[in-house]
Image (tube, grey):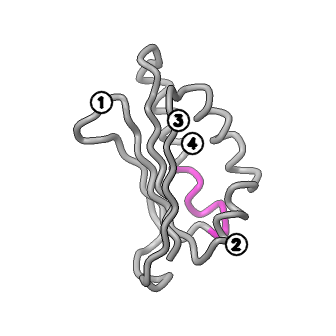
Amino acid sequence: MLWHVVKFRIRPEVGADERDAFTALLGGLAGVVPSLRFARVAPSLDEPDVIGLLTGFDDVAGLEAYKVHEAHLPVIAMAKALSAEITRLDMVTADPPDALALSV
């Protein structure tokens, strides 16, 4: 599995409604982007201004397809508008693609 982990540090002036809309938009990608095998979105336990995203793909080609998918493009725009900082980590593990079910 290729794991795509993203940490969004939300700007302090962003309100709860905008944060909730962003989280919903992120979660809405599950089942829409064909190459997306696993997705979880959640706030950080110890950093109240951080939202985390964990996604899984079969391979690099799946991640690349996700990056340019029409449903992902509004997420990118909203992330840039709301975030003070975005940190990404991509890593490969030996997990089989069906190790975790697609869900949010």
Upstream in sequence: badge 4 or badge 2: 4
Above or below — where is 4 with respect to 43? below
Q: Which residue is mark 1?
A: 48
Distance between mark 3 and mark 2 Cα atoms? 25 Å
Please name the residue shown 76% across and 51% down the image: 70
Going by the numbered disc 1, the residue's amino acid type is: Pro
Please name the residue shown 58% across and 77% down the image: 58
Above or below — where is 18 with respect to 47? above
Going by the numbered disc 3, the residue's amino acid type is: Phe
Q: Is 29 included in the stretch rendered in magenta?
A: yes
Upstream in sequence: badge 4 or badge 1: 4
Q: Which residue is mark 4?
A: 25
Distance between mark 3 and mark 1 Cα atoms? 15 Å
Left or right: residue 84 versus residue 50 is right
Distance between mark 4 and mark 2 Cα atoms? 23 Å
Upstream in sequence: badge 3 or badge 1: 3
What label does residue 22 carry, if any?
3
Name, please, the residue furthest toward the left. 46
Callout 2 secondary element = helix
Quarter of the picture holding the C terminus: bottom left
Q: Which residue is mark 2?
A: 61
